[in-house]
Amino acid sequence: MNLKHKTVSLFYILILLQTGCTSSDKLTAYNGELISRTNVTQRTIEQLDSLIVSYDFIPLETGDNSLLSNITDIRYHDRKFFVTSSGAGSSSEILVFDSLGKYLNRIGRIGRGPDEYLGLSAWYFDPQLKQVILVDPGKRKIFHYGIDGNYVPNSETNMEPTLHNVKRLYSIDSNTVIACYGVNSTNNNLLATYPANLKKQKPYRKTRLTCTKPGNSSYPSNPVGRDGDAYHVMLPLSDTILRYRNGTWEPCYVITYFNEGKSYKPGKKETDFEEIRQRAAERNFRYIRGLVENDRYILFEYLGGSILWDKQAKRGTYVADGYNAERLNGFPFIPHTACYGADDYFVSVMTPSSFRDNAETICKNNGRQSDELQRIAAKISENDNPVLIVYHLKRQSR
């Protein structure tokens, strides 16, 4: 469904009023897709089982050197999982596991010594160099590490001030990195691009919003998805997804499914992110919290549920959180737990206790892959690292 630029929804206009394009990257006229009640149907998590072709269950190895706390990001490069983990009062770390869940190494070390970092705010994988590039605001440095976790000699550089408070970095080609900031208390950047060396920021969008609440994250989950040579990016408090391709930004999807007939326009003096978010919630206005994408589907996460959008069929399914475990025939695909996507699959994270509970029910129902589930559940305990669930999806019928 193609739309004219003037039909972009009211809430996106709200964001445009709060932000502005500031770079030479072009914003093209809107010619994207409207995701609304006319092309989205409702299904339950139990009904999504019909979309699953098969599952892979990957327990992440548990050991003294590989204990995970709060997983905030998972990426997959060179047949390895790069898992970002953070604990209360401790800096984030990147742990590397192979495709079967065997622990391999950490990326760098936390510390004040040479080649060590104090704090990790964001990182990306450079496919050309086969290196992890890590931003350390504590030392105000950028570090390069090999996939084996070792520091690359003489690679340390000074951090650009514009990288302060960056939340996510994504390498999109040999010399372009997307930087997502979210709303923070120290600068008004929302979205920018950099060359691979993370010098000379090209800001794309800024905001007049501020955030005074400690520990706020305007990106509760992943803000970027990939579709071939294009990247889809969400903005805080927006119902519109942007696409970046070949140096050009354009609105790609506008999601009105939840907000048809609603509008909320803060006054010019309203700038606090938390206050605006609260008042929007009071008006039952819902906005995108994160997205995950594979070749066929894109998942838009909302509070209380998710939309699974079929990019080829151009239609979607809304799935509310929650399910009846007793009705499970296969392992539940819970959209809001998905944290990575590629090819035909999505990857979710599940605690050992939840995995064992679901496995027990599915085995009792003689569901799919029961023997494998029973074998894995017998080997893990509630104190082990989480289990990665890889869901291979098929096409939705037209």
Image (cartoon, rainbow, N blue to C red):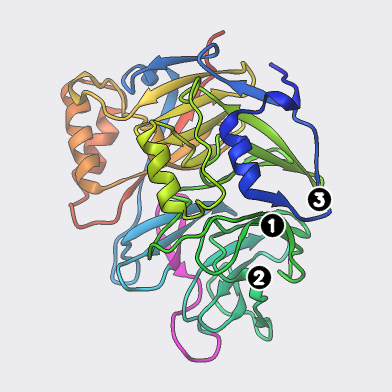
Three-letter amino acid code of the residue under disc 2: Thr
211 lies left or right of 166: left
Q: Residues within 10 Å of mark 1 (few under 14, many from 20)?
A: many
> Mark 2 and mark 3: span between their CA atoms?
18 Å
Q: Which residue is mark 1?
A: 192
Q: For the view shown, which residue lies furthest in the bottom direction? A: 113
Q: Secondary structure at mark 2?
A: helix
Q: Label 2 near label 1: C-beta < 8 Å?
A: yes
Q: Residue at x 39, y 20 (%)?
A: 48
Residue 117, how many percent across, how many down?
Answer: 50, 81
Three-letter amino acid code of the residue under disc 1: Ala
Can see residue 233?
no
Q: Quadrant of the C terminus?
A: top right
Residue 168, how many percent across, how many down?
Answer: 56, 58
Among the two numbered marks 1 and 3 on one chain, the one whose residue lies closer to the N terminus: 3
170 lies left or right of 373: right
> Mark 1 and mark 3: span between their CA atoms?
10 Å
| Number of the label disc, if any, that sits on residue 162 | 2
What stretch of residues is rendered in magenta? 93-115
207 and 26: which one is in front? 207
Does 243 appear above or below 61? above
